[in-house]
Image (cartoon, grey):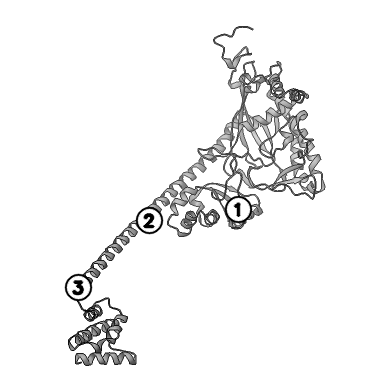
């Protein structure tokens, strides 16, 4: 084995030249969405991250800033009680009912079918429902929550078709030989990981402008007409639209022109790669159509696919690349022909359909000019920037609301502290007065104490009546003091003059007689 040059990187072992990326390898394209495409982030969102709004039966799901809303809602009794009690079902209902989406919406996504929205709203409001009312969102950037089609998804779909083109049953035979056989056979096709042939192809992520996605239902259908499919949650999907997406891929040019060079020496330029993908995915489209959508109970899906079928028939295989990407692409489109487990039990018997109308995942990647790419991408970026400005304005408004809420909370806290201090001062005052009275009464006889208690400003009617009952038993001096105390007390209680009961009038007369009135 020849010695490796000290200037030759380990990643270039087995190659005579390093990979070369030049302007010639830049390939712009437009992405045409034929059927809904859903590519999730791996995390579903619950009603604690979204709300649904209805404008004349046009429903919209808003991804919201829940933390900001909760901070601004601290003073609201219902919300605070739900948080303290850990009543998530109550909290998500309150959130859907009370949250102001103009302030707290981070991104809005139309819901394609009213029935999908109504089902979610019903699940959110039903405290007895076991449904989490979750939705599968489209993958988004962490920084500015822009949805995008990952370049890795497109490259993965291309890679599957290329593997199928190169495989002639070798992968299946190799995997049966030993557990490492499959990997070894792939290395024969593409080279080892440090110099893999597909490193010659790079596909950039494709930004999606606001409003290009929709929330759709995902329903599983079966070959057997009377069997129910496995329930699936709604998902956010990139849907067919007049708005075109633009992307770019790069092919290395170390061999003089942009292409993938296989270890066998075979060269795969874009035109050939596009034809390979067309052959692979068209065969699968037609096979799926024939197997599922010609059945009576699924014929409505077949009718919806007829315009798609016509578009596929018009494809120029060397300029337009047919692909199937994203979730619900199904096993036949992600496995090679001679190694797909389509004959095993459970495989190939179901399809997942968007809004019960059409399958997921079909797109066409078409070459375009640099000028069209730049113009189209600018339109997308402008739309994204406009949305970012609106989000920033909403953020400023949210922060203002949160500041108001904090100021209100501070006022309430200060008022509560002042009320507490005042109550404590009042308690201490009463304790002091009680102590002083107790000290004053300490040396009095029981009769004198009763008189003093009735003479006090806080004397009750019951105390006065108890003293009156003892009035005739007192000596003349105490009797007069008791009468004075009763007079003072009853005047304060409104029991001395005016409209009185017969018994009270008699009592007042007795007291007056003692006082000589």
Q: Position of residue 442 (x, y in %)?
A: 21, 73
Instruction: Give the structural element (helix, strand or loop) at label 2.
Output: helix
Q: Which residue is denoted by mark 3 in the rendering?
A: 440
Point out the tag, 2 or 3, that comes first from the N-terminus: 2
Give the quadrant of residue 188.
Answer: top right
Q: Position of residue 102 (x, y in %)?
A: 50, 52
Q: Which residue is denoted by mark 2 in the rendering?
A: 408
Give the distance between the C-alpha atoms of the residues marked 2 and 1, in whole angstroms: 34 Å
Instruction: Give the structural element (helix, strand or loop) at label 1.
Output: strand
Specify few, some or many for label 2: CA neighbours under 10 Å numbering under 14, 14-19, or 20 or more.
Answer: some
Give the distance between the C-alpha atoms of the residues marked 1 and 3, in whole angstroms: 76 Å
Vertical placement of residue 386 versus 373, above or below:
below
On the rendered image, what quadrant is the N terminus found in? top right
Confirm or deny contact between disc 1 and disc 3 (CB under 8 A): no
Q: Please state which of the two labelled residues, at mark 2 or mark 1, is closer to the viewer.
A: 2
Whether residue 372 can be seen here? no
Residue depicted at 23% across the width and 71% down the height:
438
Q: Please state which of the two labelled residues, at mark 1 or mark 3, is closer to the viewer.
A: 3
Q: Which residue is denoted by mark 1 in the rendering?
A: 59
Instruction: Give the structural element (helix, strand or loop) at label 3.
Output: helix
Give the quadrant of residue 417.
Answer: bottom left
Give the distance between the C-alpha atoms of the residues marked 2 and 3, in whole angstroms: 47 Å
User: Which one is in front, 123 or 144?
Assistant: 123
Q: Please state which of the two labelled residues, at mark 2 or mark 3, is closer to the viewer.
A: 3
Residue depicted at 62% across the width and 46% down the height:
214
Whether residue 177 can be seen here? yes
On the rendered image, what quadrant is the C terminus found in? bottom left
Vertical placement of residue 288 versus 192, above or below:
below
Residue farthest to the left, as pictured: 477
Q: Position of residue 165 (x, y in %)?
A: 75, 25
Vertical placement of residue 176 versus 291, above or below:
above
């Amino acid at each position: 084995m020849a010695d490796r040059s000290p200037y030759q990187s380990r990643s270039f072992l087995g190659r005579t030249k390093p990979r070369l990326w030049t302007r010639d390898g830049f390939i712009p394209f437009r992405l045409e969405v034929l059927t809904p495409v859903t590519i999730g982030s791996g995390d579903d969102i619950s009603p604690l991250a979204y709300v649904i709004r209805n404008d004349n039966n046009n429903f919209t799901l808003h991804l919201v800033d829940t933390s900001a809303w909760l901070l601004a809602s601290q003073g609201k009794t219902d919300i605070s009680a739900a948080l303290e009690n850990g009543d998530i079902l109550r909290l998500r209902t309150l959130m859907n009912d009370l949250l102001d989406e103009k302030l707290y919406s981070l991104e809005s996504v139309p819901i394609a079918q009213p029935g999908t929205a109504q089902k979610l709203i019903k699940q959110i409001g039903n405290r007895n429902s076991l449904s989490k009312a979750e939705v599968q969102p489209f993958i988004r950037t962490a920084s500015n929550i822009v949805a995008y089609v990952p370049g890795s998804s497109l490259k993965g779909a291309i890679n599957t078709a290329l593997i199928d083109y190169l495989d002639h049953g070798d992968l299946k035979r190799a995997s049966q030989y030993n557990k490492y056989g499959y990997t070894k056979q792939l290395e024969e096709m593409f080279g080892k990981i440090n110099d893999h042939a597909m490193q010659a192809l790079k596909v950039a992520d494709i930004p999606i402008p606001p409003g290009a996605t929709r929330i759709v239902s995902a329903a599983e259908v079966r070959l057997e007409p009377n069997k129910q499919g496995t329930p699936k949650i709604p998902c956010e999907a990139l849907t067919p639209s007049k708005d075109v997406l633009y992307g770019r891929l790069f092919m290395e040019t170390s061999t003089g022109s942009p292409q993938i060079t296989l270890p066998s020496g075979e060269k795969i330029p874009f035109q050939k790669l596009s034809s390979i993908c067309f052959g692979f995915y068209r065969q699968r489209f037609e096979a799926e159509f024939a197997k599922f959508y010609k059945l009576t109970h699924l014929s409505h899906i077949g009718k919806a696919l007829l315009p798609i079928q016509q578009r596929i028939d018009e494809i120029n295989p060397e300029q337009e690349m047919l692909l199937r990407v994203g979730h619900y692409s199904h096993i036949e489109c992600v496995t090679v022909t001679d190694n797909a487990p389509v004959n095993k039990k459970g495989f190939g018997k179901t399809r997942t359909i968007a809004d019960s109308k059409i399958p997921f995942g079909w797109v066409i990647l078409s070459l375009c000019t640099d000028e069209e790419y730049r113009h189209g991408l600018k339109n997308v970026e402008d739309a994204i920037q406009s949305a970012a400005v609106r989000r920033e304005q909403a953020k400023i408004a949210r922060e203002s609301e949160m500041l108001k809420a904090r100021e209100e909370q501070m006022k309430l806290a200060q008022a509560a502290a002042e009320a507490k201090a005042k109550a404590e001062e009042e308690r201490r005052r009463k304790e002091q007065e009680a102590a002083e009275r107790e000290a004053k009464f300490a040396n009095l006889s029981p009769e004198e104490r009763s008189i003093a208690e009735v003479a006090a400003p806080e004397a009750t009617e019951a105390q006065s009546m108890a003293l009156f009952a003892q009035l005739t038993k007192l000596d003349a001096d105490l009797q007069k003091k008791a009468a004075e105390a009763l007079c003072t007390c009853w005047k304060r209680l409104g029991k001395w003059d005016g409209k009185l009961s017969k018994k009270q009038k008699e009592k007042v007369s007795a007291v007056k007689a003692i006082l000589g009135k």
